[in-house]
Amino acid sequence: MTCSQTTKTRGYKTKENPLPENKVPDSCCEGEDSSNRALNVVIIGSGSGAFACAIKAAEGGAKVTLIEGADVIGGCCVNVGCVPSKILIRAAQLAQQQRINPFAGLENYAPQLSRALLAQQQTARVEELRVTKYQDILETNPALNLLKGWAHFKNANTLLVRENDGTAQEIHADKILI
């Protein structure tokens, strides 16, 4: 299943430039035999959706560049959303069960909470997931490349990327995913 098909099955609309599968339009690679060149895909973002599409595209033979402006890769879910909040929610549930449990044979008690220790555990788990789910994949897949910076469109197949150090570069792609 392609990235576009996967996106559509989730109820989102996609708009693609009409290009033959794994082919590059002649206008972007003058003097080059485009039939032997891998599809060049650029993905803005580095969250779970971006990585799912990047891996699928790389499996299909594409060269993939992920562009991330944030200080860390992984997107909102692993860094500031789902993962960290679920750790604290689960800790709160366990504390509540210790205070008020439904079993007459178990004594209720007020648990000792250490916000600092919970925060340390939360940070360690987030870092562990970021490494195993994102960083390790980048390091072990030569078809994937990470570019740190902020992207905006110049045209349908070109992005201008302002890197965190202030420099800028143009990135050309056959397909661009946001």
Image (cartoon, rainbow, N blue to C red):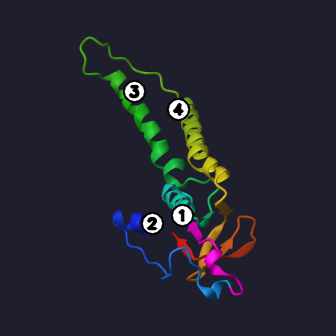
Q: Residue 2 got which mark? A: 2
First in sequence, mark 4 or 1: give its number: 1
User: Tag 1: Cα neighbours inside 10 Å, few (<14), some, or many (≥20)?
Assistant: some
Callout 3: helix, strand or loop? helix
Please, is residue 146 above or below residue 18 in the view? above
Q: Residues within 10 Å of mark 2 (few under 14, many from 20)?
A: few
**Above or below, comparing residue 73 to residue 163 in the picture:** above
The residue indicated by pointer 1 is 60
Q: Which residues are magenta?
A: 30-45
Q: Amino acid at mark 3?
A: Ala
Disc 1 to disc 2: CB gap under 8 Å: yes
For the residues marked 1 and 2, what is the alpha-carbon distance in whole angstroms? 9 Å
Left or right, residue 158 beside residue 103: right
Instruction: Identify the residue position indicated by label 3 in the image.
Output: 95
Instruction: Measure how far apart labels 4 and 1 are at the Cα level.
Output: 42 Å
Choose mark 3 or mark 2, whichever is in front. 2
